[in-house]
Image (cartoon, rainbow, N blue to C red):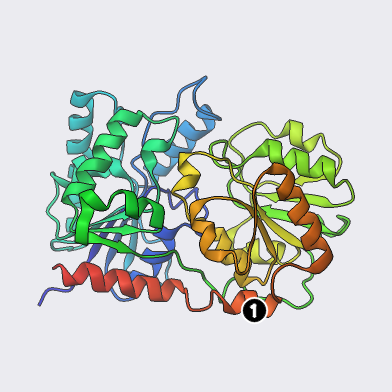
Amino acid sequence: MTEASYICFSAQDWWYFNHAHSDFQLMLRVAETRPVLFVNSITLRMPLPGRSSHFVRRLVRKARSMTKRMSHPMPDLPRLAVFSPVVLPFYGSDRARRINARFIGFQVGRAAKRLALHDPIAVVTIPTAVDVLSHLDHGPVIYNRSDRHSAFGEADQTSIAAMEQRLLETADRVLYVSTEMMREEAPIVGDRAVFLDHGVDADHFTLTADPKRPADIADLPAPIVGYFGGLDDYLVDLDLIADLANALPEVTVLLIGEASHAMEPLEAIPNVHWIGPRPYADIPTYGACFDVAIMPWLDNDWIKYANPIKLKEYLALGLPVVSTDFPEVQHYTDRVRVAANPDDFIEQIRLTLKDGGIGTPEQRRRSVLSASWDARARDLMRLAEGEA
């Protein structure tokens, strides 16, 4: 019997994205026992001046990624290969899309042959891969429906929605992390839908009784209300963070992560400290210093169908969490304080600073220990290989 192998069409780029994303976490574990070709994002859109933030930096970054082609970035995980195809991201034109799909399919097919992958299982997160699949020999298609990408404002939403629809109709399995999205799409997907919740690397995000602060935040005054992760303009409510900082001048608001928009207005507030991105390996050390961890999301369709991985990471660190409201967080109200509105968000933080949050740090950590990425990867392989 031929050994199962995998091609993952990721929505992220190995070289430039935080490895906390589910594509990375799942495929790293699959690659412990199966050959994996991890295809860096073939993008949703072409960054344009005036429409896209930091468009020059993003173009340069993607160009650099494409020069890396195929490599084995982890010596202790030789079955993992990372590949950056050359991409022409013109998804608004049918003709350009067909040419691009054929071109990407040719490149990925050659990479798969070099790795001797035979009818690999295709795990698809980014919907633009649907056109590429018709130019590849592959086995079952698993659509990892981790986000509603057609809700992304910079993309050609009509084209992306059509691609999502095709994947929903044709994939052998559709994996969901949002119960709300799974419910809404049930008439299309039917019994091919599976809820596969996000996991957490509990060994990495470890409860620390008396954390030692990293040198770059050692002098920040306590208490610290903190956030780590992408500070994306379609995701994070910067106005809410500003209101929080102004309402609670006695706290330090610490923001860790890459920003896709100007941060100067926030940095002008004396008790706000944005230190930019930090390596994934170091994030638990910073997070362990938070007195309250926050999830200040915008109220939009992207968040409506989201299930942020950082929630479990916060809880694994034993942190008290305050969040704005969104459907998936309602499953965590026994351990997370959920604010009804912006004023309530600030009041819930104030209360949490006084009483330490719901439960103890040990209880919060124990509540997510069963949700390991190892278990999620085993579930994925059972579902995928059961279709073979």
Above or below, 170 against 312 in this view is above
* Nearer-the-camera pick, 161 or 271: 161
**Image-based side of 287 in relation to 382, left or right:** right
* Nearer-the-camera pick, 252 or 38: 252
Q: Can you tell which quarter of the image residue 53 is in? A: top right
Question: Residue 30's x, y, as percent?
Answer: 33, 70
- Tag 1: amino acid: Gln
Residue 92 in view in this figure: yes
Question: Residue 14's x, y, as percent?
Answer: 44, 53
* Residue at image point 52% right, 55% down: 308
**Image-based side of 241 in relation to 120, left or right:** right
* Residue at image point 49% right, 57% down: 328
Question: Residue 326's x, y, as percent?
Answer: 53, 50
On-image quarter of the C terminus:
bottom left
Residue 282 in view in this figure: no
On-image quarter of the N terminus:
bottom left
Question: In this figure, which residue is indicated by the disc labeled 1?
Answer: 363
* Residue at image point 46% right, 74% down: 372
Question: Residue 330's x, y, as percent?
Answer: 53, 59
